Amino acid sequence: MTAKLPAPVVLSGRHVRLEPLTRAHVPDLFAAGGGDEEVWRWIPVPMPRTEADMAAVVDTRLADPDCVPFAVVAVGSGRAVGMSCYYDAAAEDELLEIGGTWYARAVWRTAVNTEAKLLLLTHAFEELGMGRVSWQTDHRNERSQNAIRRLGAVHEGTFRRNKRRPDGSWRDSVHFSMLAGEWPAAKARLTGRLAAG
């Protein structure tokens, strides 16, 4: 059976709610991570230094036909603290990529990323019927690589000189994936991690 392509949807958890990204999220997103070089160090777009710059980032995601973007909203505050996207979905091949993810530094090493990825993966595998979910990140971004590994993803290799960074230098892209058969064990680990607090 062919998988379904992702569409804008609200995905709710105990700590975060993923909702379709809109221009209305721009003020929260700028407050969360605008102008923070550490947040944007490895993201392949120029760091937003003004609210207008953040609006341009949001507009770019909204205009990309291969992207289904989400604002990551902290349930406690009701404010957007980051974003994440489904990319390059192919229903016939049952695959999609999760990417374009960033979070405010204030929520690093909290339940935010774990639950956001749990929601995205649950929806991808259990609702959309995907057989493969992938990620890629800058080879210098060890924090991101470690976070992806903690999800239970498998390292597949590195594409050399794969993307140009905003500063003009070239990055190697480290690729990871998770298959539908690997999802139940990964889900159990992620759910247990969240329950442990």
Image: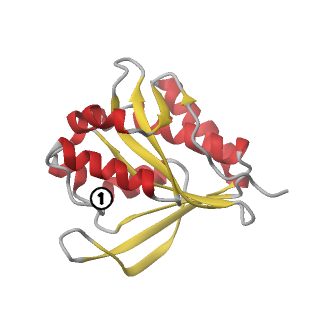
Q: In the visual, does 183 lie left or right of 108? A: right
**Quarter of the figure that contains the N terminus:** bottom right
- According to the picture, the residue beneath numbered tag 1 turns out to be 43
Note whether 154 is above or below 77 in the view shown: below
- Looking at the rendered structure, the secondary structure element under dot 1 is loop
Q: Amino acid at mark 1?
A: Ile
Q: Is residue 156 above or below residue 150?
A: below
Residue occupying the far bottom of the picture: 161
Residue 126 locus on image (x, y percent):
72, 42
Total numbered labels: 1
Label 1 crowd bin: few (<14), some (14–19), many (20+), radius 10 Å: some
71 sits to left or right of 90: left
Report the colour scheme: secondary structure
Residue at 16 percent of width and 46 percent of height: 36
Residue placed most toward the observer, 157 or 60: 60
Q: Is residue 116 above or below residue 150?
A: above
User: Residue at horizontal 43%, vertical 50%?
Assistant: 62
168 lies left or right of 95? left
User: Does 12 sit above or below residue 152?
Assistant: above
> Residue 27 lies in what quarter of the image?
top left
User: Going by the image, does 53 lie left or right of 153?
Assistant: left
Q: Position of residue 114 (x, y in %)?
A: 47, 38
Quadrant in the picture for the C terminus: top left
Residue 134, quarter of picture: bottom right
Q: Which residue is pictured at 35% across the width and 48% down the height?
A: 58
Residue 195 x %, y %: 53, 24
Residue 129 pos. (x, y %): 74, 50
The residue drawn where x is 70% and y is 54% is 130
Taking the view exactly as shown, the residue that stands out farthest to the top is 76
Closer to the camera in the image, 27 or 97: 27
Q: Quadrant of residue 165?
A: bottom left
